[in-house]
Image: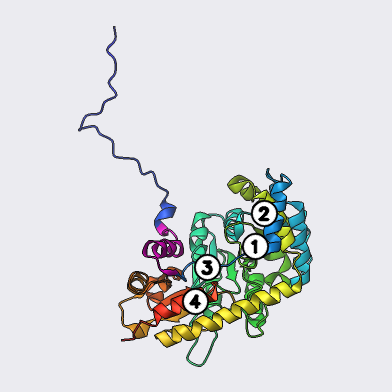
């Protein structure tokens, strides 16, 4: 009888462990924003870190969701989105931005704007492509670019100088970021974390570069209705020559205070939409069916709803900013979205990480370290972001705790 071959390895011929992990994940960390929420829960702190409201969503859309469930709209919707919601998205793009959209060929409903962004980048990017991103940036954009095989190229938004409220970029620096490898630019307006709302002249400069270098614009417009001080939101797709080279990303989370519903969308020309739909189909199949029906109801709310929304957030901004300034922060007053970036240099701590750890553990308020919004952590080492999408009593509770801080 032949001798059985032993599969046991000796110390001499042991094989080194396999490298199981993708190289891609070595280039980014888990979400710092969501980690700060966990820290807030651990220490019982007031959570001004993560951007979710602690107040109720509109009753009309909650009732629409309940009604959809009762009607047994609980199975898969059409992969790229329920017809009622796609129709509502197309209608509102026309009302809000004057953009004509075909709901059958140009809209893809996703599991939140987060999935809409990664589905878009996976659909359009190849290895070796470059994606231009303004920094400070929402923390997903860099990892999304890397996961899609592209390389992010960052262009700085510089904090407002004393006496100014505008975050500015250098035109020469932006132009230098565009070359033959550039596939797309990601633009978030109103901007998270800065609150900057890009002006028409700034958007036209960006669109000129997109046309010159044959580049796609991918715009995250999730905060389009949260604007202050007479500021206007302009969609890139509404500018001359940009309709056929823009993907507009949006969603329900911020406008309707339903960040946990995960319903967002991408609006793009038909060829790009076809590619996004392919990726979306195999990435998540589809967004929650009953919540899509509620989304159609949400997008049918009257204009008064949006005016009240912006006014409510203006009140909250004006509630928190003076409290932060009284506590010793220098605040960069936002024009849109519901965050305020601050300078912490008066407090004398080594960096933003040390500061937010002290803040959540000892003071009882959670915020986000500014370094998480930059490629080089040193650029945000003296900045911290606060979210004010909270009840006034929540902001008051945070203010009372922050009043214990003393600049050094």
Is 31 one of the magenta-colored residues? yes
Q: Residue at x 61, y 67 (%)?
A: 254
Q: Residue at x 59, y 70 (%)?
A: 187
- The mark tally for this picture is 4
- View extreme (top): residue: 1
- The reply to whether callout 2 and callout 1 are in contact (CB within 8 Å) is yes
Q: State which region is magenta.
A: 27-46
Magenta stretch: helix, strand or loop mostly: helix
Task: Measure how far apart labels 2 and 3 are at the Cα level.
Answer: 20 Å
Coordinates of residue 123 in the picture (x, y in percent) = 61, 54
Q: Which residue is mark 2?
A: 291
**In the figure, 34 relative to 401: above or below?**
above
At numbered mark 2, what does the secondary structure look like: helix, strand or loop?
A: helix
Mark 3 crowd level (few <14, some 14–19, many ≥20, 10 Å Cα): many
Q: Are marks 2 and 3 in contact (CB under 8 Å)?
A: no
Q: CA distance from mark 4 to mark 3?
A: 13 Å
Mark 2, residues whose alpha carbon is within 10 Å: few (<14), some, or many (≥20)? Answer: many
Instruction: Verify CB contact (< 8 Å) between mark 4 and mark 3.
Output: no
Q: In the figure, is residue 109 to the left or right of 25? A: right
**Is residue 60 at all visible to an observer of this figure?**
yes
Q: Residue at x 37, y 65 (%)?
A: 43
Q: Determine crowd level at label 1: few under 14, some 14-19, many 20+ residues with C-alpha closer than 10 A.
A: many
Which residue is at the far bottom?
Answer: 163
Q: CA distance from mark 4 to mark 2?
A: 30 Å
| Residue to which mark 1 is pinned | 252
Which mark lies nearer to you, 4 or 3?
4
Binning the other alpha carbons within 10 Å of mark 4 as few (below 14), some (14 to 19) or many (20 upward) gives many
Residue 91 vs residue 41, the one in the foreground:
41
| Residue hosting label 3 | 51
User: Which is nearer the N-term, disc 4 or disc 3?
Assistant: 3
For the residues marked 2 and 1, what is the alpha-carbon distance in whole angstroms? Answer: 10 Å
- The residue at which mark 4 appears reads as 395
């Amino acid at each position: 009888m032949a001798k059985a071959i032993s599969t046991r390895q000796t110390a001499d011929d042991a094989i080194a462990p396999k490298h199981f992990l993708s190289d891609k994940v070595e280039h980014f960390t888990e979400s710092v924003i969501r980690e700060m929420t966990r820290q807030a829960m651990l220490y019982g702190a007031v959570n001004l870190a993560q951007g979710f409201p602690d107040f109720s969503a509109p009753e009309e859309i909650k009732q629409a969701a309940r009604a959809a469930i009762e009607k047994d709209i609980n199975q898969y919707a059409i992969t790229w989105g329920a017809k009622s919601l796609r129709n509502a998205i197309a209608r509102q793009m026309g009302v809000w931005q004057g953009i004509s959209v075909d709901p059958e060929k140009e809209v893809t409903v996703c599991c939140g704007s987060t999935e809409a962004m990664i589905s878009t980048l996976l659909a359009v990017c190849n290895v070796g492509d470059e994606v231009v991103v303004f920094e400070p940036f929402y923390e997903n954009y860099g990892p999304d670019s890397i996961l899609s095989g592209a390389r992010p190229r960052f262009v700085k938004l510089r904090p407002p100088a004393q006496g100014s409220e505008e975050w500015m970029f250098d035109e020469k620096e932006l132009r230098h970021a565009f070359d033959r490898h550039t596939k797309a630019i990601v633009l978030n307006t109103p901007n998270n974390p800065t609150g900057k709302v890009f002006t028409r002249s700034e958007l036209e400069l960006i669109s000129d570069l997109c046309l010159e270098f044959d580049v796609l614009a991918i715009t995250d417009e999730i905060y389009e209705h949260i604007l202050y001080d007479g500021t206007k939101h302009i969609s890139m797709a509404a500018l001359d020559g940009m309709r056929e080279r823009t993907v507009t990303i949006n969603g329900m989370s911020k406008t309707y205070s339903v960040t946990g519903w995960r319903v967002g969308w991408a609006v793009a020309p038909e060829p790009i939409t076809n590619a996004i739909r392919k990726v979306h189909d195999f990435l998540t199949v589809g967004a929650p069916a009953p919540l899509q029906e509620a989304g159609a109801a949400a997008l049918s709310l009257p204009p008064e709803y949006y005016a009240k929304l912006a006014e409510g957030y203006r009140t909250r901004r004006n509630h928190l900013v003076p409290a932060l300034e009284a506590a010793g922060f220098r605040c960069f007053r936002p024009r849109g979205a519901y965050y305020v970036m601050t300078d912490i240099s008066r407090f004398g701590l080594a960096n933003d990480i040390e500061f937010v750890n002290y803040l959540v553990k000892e003071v009882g308020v959670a915020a986000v370290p500014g370094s998480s919004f930059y490629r080089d952590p040193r650029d945000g080492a003296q900045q911290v972001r606060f979210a004010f999408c909270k009840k006034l009593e929540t902001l008051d509770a945070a203010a009372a705790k922050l009043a214990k801080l003393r600049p050094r």
